[in-house]
């Protein structure tokens, strides 16, 4: 009887050892497969390994979330009050354009317009965004000085924030938030 118990324990031990050994080999193979696919020298300047669609999706999300954060920290005015302010409309345009320029993504005009449109939909809502985009596209030269000031502020802030300058000039964009706080006082 004792010999049978020893043999059973030996077989169970051998079986467990074989399972663990096979599992370890599988884990090593999976780890090697994953690591062989990774670039050992990641490129943070917009490498061509990531296709434009993925980068565009990330860019759209980044623009919308950072603009919405500024709006929220300003005291969160309603979308209708935002859409009546030419500085805000210009800032959203300039901020979007600045992000596209700094990220250096090769976009055609339709893609650029698509990013701007999605941003406007997110900030102002579908109906108001459509209404606001018409004059910008049809007669951009007739936009007000406040619109141009907002555009310039948006582009400059993105360049300071994400641009190559870095250092002490690099700061988070706050122009929209500060403008809205001043407008709300």
Image (tube, rainbow, N blue to C red):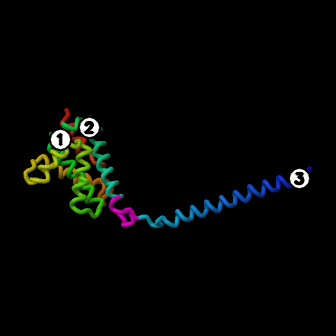
Q: Residue 95 carries which label?
A: none
Q: Residue at x 52, y 67 (%)?
A: 36
Which quadrant holds residue 12?
bottom right
Please tell me whether mark 1 sits on a helix, a strand or a loop. Answer: helix
Image x and y of residue 133, in percent: 16, 49
Q: Mark 2 points at which residue?
A: 74
Image x and y of residue 180, in percent: 21, 39
Q: Nearer the viewer, residue 157 or 168?
A: 157
Which quadrant holds residue 167?
bottom left
Q: Report the Cα–Cα distance between label 3 and label 2.
A: 78 Å
Image x and y of residue 67, in percent: 28, 45
- What main secondary structure does the magenta stretch of the protein show? loop
Q: Which residue is drawn at 46% across and 66% down?
A: 39
Mark closest to the chain's N terminus, 3 or 2: 3
| Residue 176 forms part of the magenta stretch | no
Tags 3 and 1 in contact by the CB under 8 Å rule? no
What segment carries the magenta color?
43-53
Label 3 neighbour load within 10 Å: few <14, some 14-19, many 20+ = few
User: In the visual, does 43 lie left or right of 142?
Assistant: right
Q: Residue 4 carries which label?
A: 3
Q: Report the Cα–Cα distance between label 2 and label 1.
A: 15 Å
Please tell me whether mark 3 sits on a helix, a strand or a loop. Answer: helix
Which quadrant holds residue 164?
bottom left
Label 1 neighbour load within 10 Å: few <14, some 14-19, many 20+ = some
Q: Residue furthest left?
A: 142
Image x and y of residue 148, in percent: 13, 50
Q: Which residue is drawn at 26% across and 53% down?
A: 158
Mark closest to the chain's N terminus, 3 or 1: 3
Mark closest to the chain's N terminus, 2 or 1: 2
Label 2 neighbour load within 10 Å: few <14, some 14-19, many 20+ = some
Q: Mark 1 points at which residue?
A: 83
């Amino acid at each position: 009887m004792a010999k049978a118990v020893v043999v059973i324990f030996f077989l169970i031990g051998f079986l467990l050892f074989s399972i663990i050994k096979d599992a370890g080999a599988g884990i090593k193979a999976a780890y090697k497969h994953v690591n062989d696919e990774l670039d050992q020298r990641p490129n943070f300047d917009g490498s061509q390994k990531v296709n434009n669609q993925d980068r565009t999706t990330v860019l759209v999300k980044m623009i919308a979330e950072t603009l919405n954060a500024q709006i929220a920290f300003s005291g969160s005015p309603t979308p209708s009050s935002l859409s009546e302010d030419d500085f805000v409309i210009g800032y959203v345009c300039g901020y979007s354009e600045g992000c596209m320029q700094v990220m250096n993504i090769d976009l055609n005009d339709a893609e650029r317009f698509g990013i701007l449109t999605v941003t406007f939909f997110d900030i102002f809502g579908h109906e108001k965004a459509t209404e606001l985009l018409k004059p910008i596209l049809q007669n951009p030269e007739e936009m007000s000085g406040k619109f141009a000031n907002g555009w310039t502020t948006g582009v400059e802030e993105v360049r300071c924030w994400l641009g190559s300058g870095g250092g002490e000039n690099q700061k988070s964009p706050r122009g929209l938030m500060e403008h809205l706080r001043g407008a709300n006082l």
